[in-house]
Image: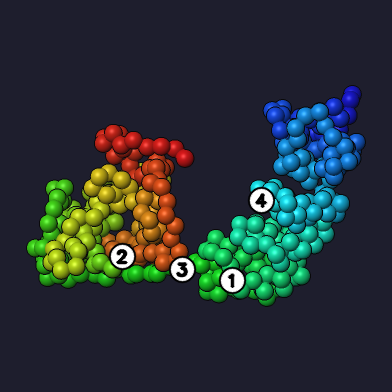
Amino acid sequence: MATRRSGPKESALAPSDLRAAIAADATAFGAEIAVLRAEDVDRLKRILAGQTTTEYPVSIKRAWGALVRSDPSPATGQLLGQALSAPAQSPRHRLAAAAYLGLLPSAASEGPLLAALADASGSLRTEIVKSLGQVGTAKTLAQLARIKDPGDESEARQLALAQLAIRLRQKKPGPTGDKMAAALGIAWKDENARPLSAAQLRQTLATFRGPDYGVPVSTEIGLHFMCGGKRHVVLFNRALGRGRLVRDVAARGLVAGLVVAEGEKGMKHYALRWLLLTSPGRAGIDVALVKPNGEPVLAGRAVKEGKALAFALRDTGLERTPMEVTGKVTNNDVSWKLRLWTGALRDKARPRTIQSLVAGQDYLAATGARTAQR
């Protein structure tokens, strides 16, 4: 019985198929992940060094990729380093060289990357820093510490990650806890919702303007919290009675409440922001906060935790500011904790609805809401 070969030669292209791996017009399936045979590697090095020519146009990026996969050696690192440091090389090829160096072992790549770091700027320096984060050692940490003026937020993030990754890899003391979060720009603000008295609930209802979806509001339980500089109030459905909240939430699907928010500054009224929907299922109780236009903003699930229900909701990406809500439902009370992202924000295109995060598929079917899979 024939023995199955293993190792690099199993996926190698035939010598005559070097073209499939490096030609600019090649479309051979698998060529971009294949490992070349030794004779092809030698020829490829001569091609890249300008010592021999081909009868077809060569894609420099494909050629470097094939070389890195097939010969991750210091010699390959030297070739890429020369391209990276050559001012006459096109910017996109220098970026590619920096990226491919990050795929080589440290011994083959750290030196060329550090040599190019001192004079690099902009997107090229960011790419070099990224690769150094993948392969750098303690020597790299010393060089990265000298970068005092990261050009923009993107490079600052890349620099912070590179330093942190190297420290953790080298088992050196590094930022932990709050310090690590600060280095990576991770910043959250926690806001605990507080209960409202019956008088406060009645006062809120008296200034509530807008649709209530036919929800009879309880004057026994309610919460208020701050979000986006505005006071928000959670008004619960009167069908959820104190002393039996857990049973009532689990009994059937409900518009369990309304989340209303203060109007603009100077306006003394509340307006509907979100509907609170619940829908019991086999795996727990689906919970969603939904805009009046049908877009789910926060979604998650409530599950049994002893005699209580613990719930966690995460944002679906529709809001510009990431947030999550966690809490607990006991028979007599509801707790609600909002975690709001306060780190750097990025502009983003209007996202698509994520079907798996929408609570209550029957709600989707009933409203004909259109979803798109990512």
- What percent of the width, then of the height, locates residue 368? 28, 33
- What percent of the width, then of the height, locates residue 271? 18, 57
Q: Amino acid at mark 1?
A: Asp
Query: Seen in the image, is 184 located left or right of residue 111?
Result: left
- What percent of the width, then of the height, locates residue 220? 17, 64
In the rendered structure, which disc, 1 or 3, sits on the residue that comes first in sequence? Answer: 1
Mark 3 Cα-neighbour bin, 10 Å: few <14, some 14–19, many ≥20 = few
The total of numbered circles placed on residues is 4
Location of residue 128 with respect to 203 vertically, above or below = above
Q: Are marks 1 and 3 in contact (CB under 8 Å)?
A: no
In the rendered structure, which disc, 2 or 4, sits on the residue that comes first in sequence? Answer: 4
In the rendered structure, which disc, 4 or 3, sits on the residue that comes first in sequence? Answer: 4
Q: Residue at x 34, y 62 (%)?
A: 328
Distance between mark 4 and mark 1 Cα atoms: 22 Å
Q: Which residue is mark 2?
A: 228
Mark 2 Cα-neighbour bin, 10 Å: few <14, some 14–19, many ≥20 = few
Distance between mark 1 and mark 3 Cα atoms: 22 Å
Q: Are marks 4 and 1 in contact (CB under 8 Å)?
A: no
Distance between mark 2 and mark 1 Cα atoms: 32 Å
Residue at the front extreme, as displayed: 88
* Rendered image: mark on residue 91: 4
Distance between mark 2 and mark 4 Cα atoms: 42 Å
Q: Amino acid at mark 2?
A: Gly
Q: Which residue is mark 1?
A: 149
The answer to whether one can see residue 130 in this image is no
Q: Residue at x 38, y 69 (%)?
A: 190
Quick one: SS at disc 1?
loop
Mark 1 Cα-neighbour bin, 10 Å: few <14, some 14–19, many ≥20 = few
Q: Amino acid at mark 4?
A: Pro
- Which quadrant holds the N terminus? top right
Q: Amino acid at mark 3?
A: Ala
* Rendered image: mark on residue 187: 3
